[in-house]
Amino acid sequence: MNAPPGIEDVLRELAPQVLGPLVRRFGHFDACEDAVQEALIAATVQWPAEGVPHNPRGWLVTVASRRVTDQLRSDEARRRRESTTAMLALPGDAIAPDRDDTLTLLFLCCHPALSPPSQLALTLRAVGGLTTAQIASAFLVPETTMAQRISRAKQRIKGSGARFEPPAEGERAERLGVVLHVLYLVFNEGYTATSGPHLQRTDLTAEAIRLTRVVHRLLPDDGEVAGLLALMLLTDARRPARTRPDGSLVPLEEQDRSRWDQDAIKEGVVLVTDALARAPIGPYQLQAAIAAVHDEAATADDTDWRQILGLYDLLERLAPNPMVTLNRAVAVAMVEGPAAALDLLATLDADQRVVQHYRLAAVRAHLLEMTGDRAGARAGYHEAARRTTSIPERRYLESRADRLRGAR
Amino acid sequence: MKYILLIYQNPAAWENLSEEERNRVFGEVDSLMAELTRSGEWIGGEGLADASQTKTVRVRDGVPAVTDGPFIESKEQLAGYCIVECETPERATEIAARWPDARYWAMEVRAIMEPAGEEM
């Protein structure tokens, strides 16, 4: 969409509130989703020229309904040449929104029958109101590829027999977990620093935060939803200090903390503190709490590593994962020294999930540098640089190795 | 993750394939491309003109020197490439194994660098 920002914000906000009622009315998620997309595009053309209608949602519902009925009627006419079936119901004047429509749509777009890339793409289009072209450019793939993924995702949903209704009570927690994971992936896709010709990527970080805010508004008592929103805010707060103008990465301890977004930090700290106080603890809350400890330190030296270590201990017990162990090793090094951390790292050498990962080599190099083993550290940074598939990460790791040049 | 699948061929051996065999290769490539397009994994790809049509360019002391023929002299030459986006490296390898050239010569699977990176 290329509408002025104000209009685009309104359209993106309205997208799920138009699609939800339509699907409830007509069924046919596939046809309704296409119709809403067409109505959004029509609005981006007409509204800037003719003014925003008095009732924007009503306008979109009317335009999209007309398209759906046209589409379904022509399908019906085709079918009727072969057999007689009942006439389609026409839309009423007003199709009322339901406050849980957006949540139901999220559950549908993040259906477990879909692969994660399909879940992401469909969520951004059907709930986020982004166009296929915007999603394609954000994920750096051709528009035809993205269109294919979206249409395949919709076929899968149809084939799975999934209906537009909230998941059964027994599987609700698990399904919400998938929704949160998809939002987390969207955030990460946008958060990773970009450089060079790709600076124009659609801001997926802001979109992930916006959608997570919507979920938090709908489920204010869910601690993990609040935790995820806090984690995003506390991480995104560091964005202005995370890269240099040339796109190279600035590690946490070297960032200019005066450039961190204090409003985002405040909001994130309040969210996670409140969630930890009254909801069952969960991995997103713990990760948010760790981010909060980093963000609240005035300087890198002021970081409360003991508290961070305690939180990683809890996280590892709650959701064991070699990446968590890797991060915990950094905290162990700060509290107990690099030798203890290297021992911990050694336990990962037999773990097939990380043994080839650049981060294992990078963390080990960092720990070796702390012990004074400059040659070992340099070799480790080079090894990590060869393993990463990210250009800025390779640049950063090569520059760390360069600092140790001459080490033997 | 995006992968480039580099298609290696031996031009002399290709010429010695029967027309029926060559047509089978083309047919397999067409249906594989259609399948990858449907699955949303296909990003793009092209075939390359014969290696004998290659120019190799070197600049030495600011002076470009252009020679005929490929940079690396070898019986097997790059004949084309395709770019796919896959969820796992195993999946990229699986696609390469189904490319007909892998039966005769070889396919090379290389990960493509991403412009984004994680905070350290």
Image (cartoon, rainbow, N blue to C red):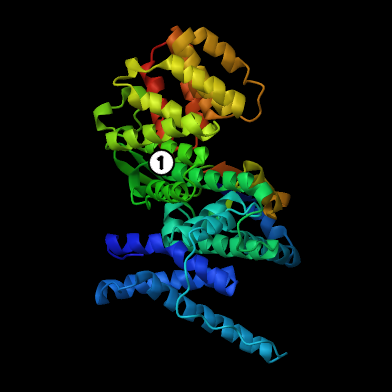
Is residue A348 placed above or below A115 in the rendered structure?
above
Residue B67 image offset from top left, x and y in percent? 43, 48
Tell me the residue at 51%/65% (across/down): A20
Name the one closer to the observer, A330 or A357: A330
Pointer 1 local density, CA inside 10 Å: few below 14, some 14–19, many at least 20? many
Locate the C terminus of chain A by quadrant: top left
**Most extreme residue toward the front, as rendered?**
A278
Locate the N terminus of chain A by quadrant: bottom left
Say which residue label 1 marks. Answer: A191
Q: Is residue A238 visible?
A: no
Query: Residue A45 appears in which quarter of the rendering?
Result: bottom left
Side of A183 where A82 appears, left or right = right
Q: The disc numbered 1 marks a residue on which chain?
A: A
Tell me the residue at 43%/41% (across/down): A229
Tell me the residue at 60%/57% (across/down): A166
Name the one closer to the observer, A45 or B2: A45
Query: Residue B109 appears in which quarter of the rendering?
Result: top right
| Secondary element type, mark 1 | helix
Side of A302 where A362 appears, left or right = right
Residue A23 image offset from top left, x and y in percent? 55, 69
Residue A2 image offset from top left, x and y in percent? 32, 65
Side of A263 where A371 appears, left or right = right
Is residue A381 placed above or below A152 in the rendered structure?
above
Is residue A219 placed above or below A321 in the rendered structure?
below
Is residue B83 placed above or below A377 in the rendered structure?
below
Q: Amino acid at mark 1?
A: Tyr
Residue A356 image offset from top left, x and y in percent? 59, 29
Name the one closer to the observer, B119 or A387: B119
Q: Is residue A281 visible?
A: yes
